[in-house]
Image (cartoon, rainbow, N blue to C red):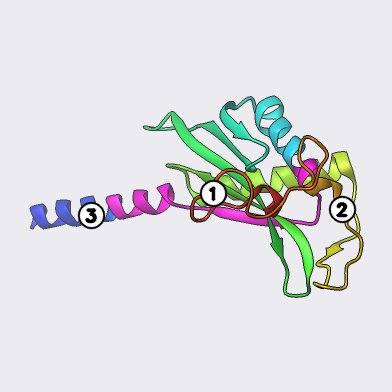
Amino acid sequence: MRPLLAIALAIGMSLASAGAASAKNSKTFDYRFDAIWSTAVRLLRVDRNYKLTEKSRDDGYILFVFPGSGAVKRCPASLEIFKVTSPGGIIQRRVQLQIAHQPSYIEIALLDRLENKLRAERGEPPPPQRVKPKGKDKDKGGDDEDKGKNGKKGKPGKGKHKGAGQASVNGR
């Protein structure tokens, strides 16, 4: 009887820890990419004092180490920012956060801190951007946010290859 209980307990614990390790949470914001990016970097590095292991503004991600507790003291974590369009045609930014070996409420709390910091430092989000209808836009200038470092608007299909599931530079 006891061996069965031990096996059931071991299976239950392994399933519970697997769920926490693969959790991902996200939140959608109306702020522009630049505002979210700089605020997220300051939140993680300055306010929370987390070690940033890698970051790419062009690709919209930050890899960092979350100081876990218990058996796992150093949890790998990632924050990604990418552009999404709501069903109403409003352009927004989604921030997706994943912290290994931690329950999802930790990720939710950190996303809430990011939202509070954005509101405290940037105020209310700017008016929403709408997707421009194709073929009717005669303005070739575009959004400054879609321009590269040289100030020129990026061209779809040009540049380095992106793997499956990655947003393009202009897709932030």
Q: Is residue 73 magenta?
A: no
Dot 3 lies on which element?
A: helix
Report the residue at 45% width, 42% height from top.
100
Dot 2 lies on which element?
A: loop
Indicate which label's residue lies in the foreground, 3 or 1. Answer: 1
> Looking at the picture, which amino acid does disc 1 mark?
Lys
Q: In the image, which disc is placed on residue 5? A: none
Q: Which residue is mark 1?
A: 162
Report the residue at 76% width, 40% height from top.
148
Q: Is residue 1 left or right of residue 101?
A: left
Q: Which residue is mark 3?
A: 11
The boundaries of the magenta stretch are: 14-36
**Label 2 close to label 3 by CB (< 8 Å):** no
Closer to the camera in the image, 139 or 119: 139
Labels 2 and 3: the sequence-earlier one = 3
Q: Position of residue 119 (x, y in %)?
A: 84, 46
Dot 1 lies on which element?
A: loop
Q: Position of residue 167 (x, y in %)?
A: 60, 52
Labels 3 and 1: the sequence-earlier one = 3
Q: Which residue is mark 2?
A: 125
